[in-house]
Image: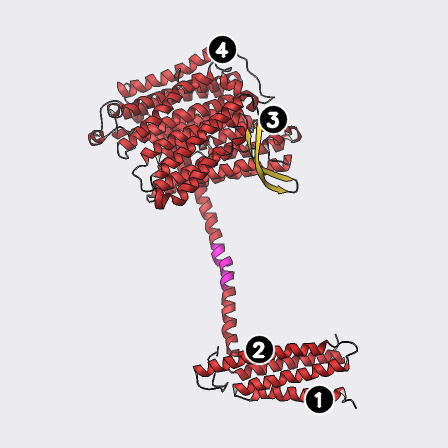
Amino acid sequence: MAVPLGAFIAVSAVLFFIGTAGVLVRRNAVVILMSVELMLNATNLALVAFSRRFSSIDERGSVFVVFIFVVAAAEVAVGLAIVLSAYRNKPTVDVDEIRQMRG
Amino acid sequence: MIQNVWLIPAFPLAAFLIDGLFGRRWLHKWTGIIASAAVGLSALIAIGVFLEVLGGHERTTVTLYEWIGVGDFHINIAALVDPLSSVMLLVVTVVSFLIFVYSNGYMEHDHGVHRFFTWLSLFVFAMLILVMADNYLLMFVGWEGVGLCSYLLIGFWFERPEPYVAAKKAFVMNRIGDWGYTIGMITTFLVFGSMQFTQVFEHVGIATQANLTLICIAFFFGATGKSAQLPLHSWLPDAMEGPTPVSALIHAATMVTAGVYLVARSMPLFAAAGPSLAVVGIVGAVTAIFAATIALVQFDIKRVMAYSTVSQLGYMFLALGVGAPVAAIFHLATHAFFKALLFLGSGSVIHGLGGEQDMRKMGGLRRKLPVTYWTMLLAGGALAALPPLAGFWSKDEIVAAAFLAGYPILWAVGILTAVLTAFYVTRAMWLTFHGEPRDHHLYDHAHESPAVMTLPLMALAVGTVVLGIAIGFPPETGFIHRFLSPAVEVEGLVEHAPEAATILVLAAISVAAGVLGILVGLSMYVRHRPDPAAVSRAAGPIYRLLVNKYFVDELYDRRIVEAFRAAFGAMWAFDVHVIDGLANRLGWLAGMSGSSLRRAQTGIVGNYALTIVAGLLVVLVVYGGYAAGIFTR
């Protein structure tokens, strides 16, 4: 029995919401990065689901997912590097403490 | 050889580049030798080209490449080699070469010698382009080039205020003339659809009288600027602030004759354009006598020569105006030699006296500077038009042409000017070289110039003596006529075939005028009968008028410069308050908006993230709203 599309979308939406909430409320930079990862994977889930559901018309959604993997990996690499540098500058990963860019 | 005509300007250009790039650091005084050698090579090729044209190549166009090709508009970098341009090439390169050699001595002690030869080489290059060009646009390149070099060289000693003020004045007055040239050039293109000399002159018939007159008057206005004719004459005497070789080359022999060349080259246009030739002739005659009267009372030796140049250029325009372009070019050539010699001689005197230019402090110098004296005496005789010196043949032809063409008034002005010319040249020679030394300190330290300066003087003196009789005899049918007539004379101008007796009588009158001027001069300055000082006192107001050059500078300052100052002051205010004001207000606006928006940059990552999410939500709501049909367009 095939899982209906709506279930995938619901899970995806929930994951995306959790990720967004994590980005907005958490103060630990590493956790924020993890939340961003969650959001990206929620999107991936939706893309894969749509791709499978509409495979007769267009399957390119799953190709897009691969791109997102790559971008996500790059994003994490850059993001962690920034967090590391910020930590060296001032020994904290609390984003509210890191305010040097204030205009 | 004609096919290699482009080598003629190439050598000075190369000298300009070499001297300009390496002169200051490495070459120093070698710049003069390089530049002189380059111009010497040009002169050799110019001689070759001249001989080939003489051998029967009436008119050749040597195209280097297409410069501009837009639609129907084609301009080539091309040289028109015909008798007229070959004569000009010859005069320009030969006189330049002699002056370059002379400059090696004259500028020896100047620390800016590399700069001097750089600009002088560039000048010769531009002058050659002007002369060779086969169209008005390329000619304009040379025209502007010589103007620029004139500016740079007048202001050569820019540490003092007078030279750079004079340079600025020369540049501005030349630009006013250039405006006329531009109008003429553009109108030519609009009327004829071409700027090429040969094409334009072939189709003179298609233009209306009004158009032709506009073109000619505009070109002539350009010529008055370059050739220092009324009303744009007043820059040339001031240009004497430059080094003397510059005065000789640019402001006597070559550049200032560019206007004469332009009108002679455009003779088919002028001949067809009704009243324009008369305008040229009248302006020339008035300038000739106007400048000659000023030259009577000047005490700066170079200024006498400068006003003399203005006056002689007036003669050339007079010749053009009465339809005798051959005589004009003939006088241009002889004048280039004897006036260059007069200037270089003056330079030799100034050099020998350590920079003194005031004739009141000279006197008796013939014993100290014998070569300079004898060569200048010949040049002075040529200027006074004594036979058989060069100036006699050419000036006599001009004056005779005016008479024969039916302009007795212009003829009378020419004769009167000849008297004045002979007088002022006698006066200048006497004050400088004869009588008793008036400043013994200067006299005791005076010395003859080195050979590098006196040899060019002698070479020019040879030209001054033989050139006229060699190419101008017999009058009206001499070599120069047979050579140049096909190139410059056009149908519509009356061909004169005067009887020998008429020519003799006219020549006799013209010689008598010269002799009269000399006798009056000698009587006044040798025997003090009448005493010059008494004459100037008796002629009080007239004397003051002449000494102050008819107050033309004051008139221009008062009426024109002031008006322009006021207008430009208003424009300046508009610029500062409105245009700059607008720019400043915009800058202030950007600054203000920036400083208010910077508060958004809290530095807290959470805020930024929240903003992104909020934006996303707005997009989603709007997009979803449209998709669901809640919002309608």
Mark 1 and mark 2 on one chain: yes
Query: Which three-letter amino acid code belongs to the residue tagged 2?
Result: Ala
Q: Distance from label 1 to label 3 (Cα)?
A: 95 Å
Above/below status of B595 relative to B86: below
Q: In percent of the image, x 75 and y 86: which residue is there?
A: A5
Is A39 or B75 nearer to us in this picture? Answer: A39
Is B234 or B138 nearer to us in this picture? Answer: B138
Q: Distance from label 4 to label 2 (Cα)?
A: 104 Å
Relative placement, left or right, of B125 versus A44 is: left
Q: Nearer the viewer, mark 4 or mark 1?
A: 1
Residue at mark 3: B272
Residue at mark 1: A10
Chain letter of the residue beneath label 4 in the structure image? B
Q: Is residue B245 visible?
A: yes
Query: Which three-letter amino acid code belongs to the residue tagged 1?
Result: Ala
Q: Residues within 10 Å of mark 3 (few under 14, many from 20)?
A: many
Query: Which three-letter amino acid code belongs to the residue tagged 3?
Result: Ala
- Residue range in magenta is B573-584
Chain letter of the residue beneath label 3 in the structure image? B
Chain letter of the residue beneath label 1 in the structure image? A
Are the residues flagged by discs 3 and 4 in contact, CB closer than 8 Å? no
Chain letter of the residue beneath label 2 in the structure image? A
Residue at mark 4: B502
Q: Residues within 10 Å of mark 4 (few under 14, many from 20)?
A: few
Q: Nearer the viewer, mark 3 or mark 2?
A: 2
Q: Residues within 10 Å of mark 2 (few under 14, many from 20)?
A: few
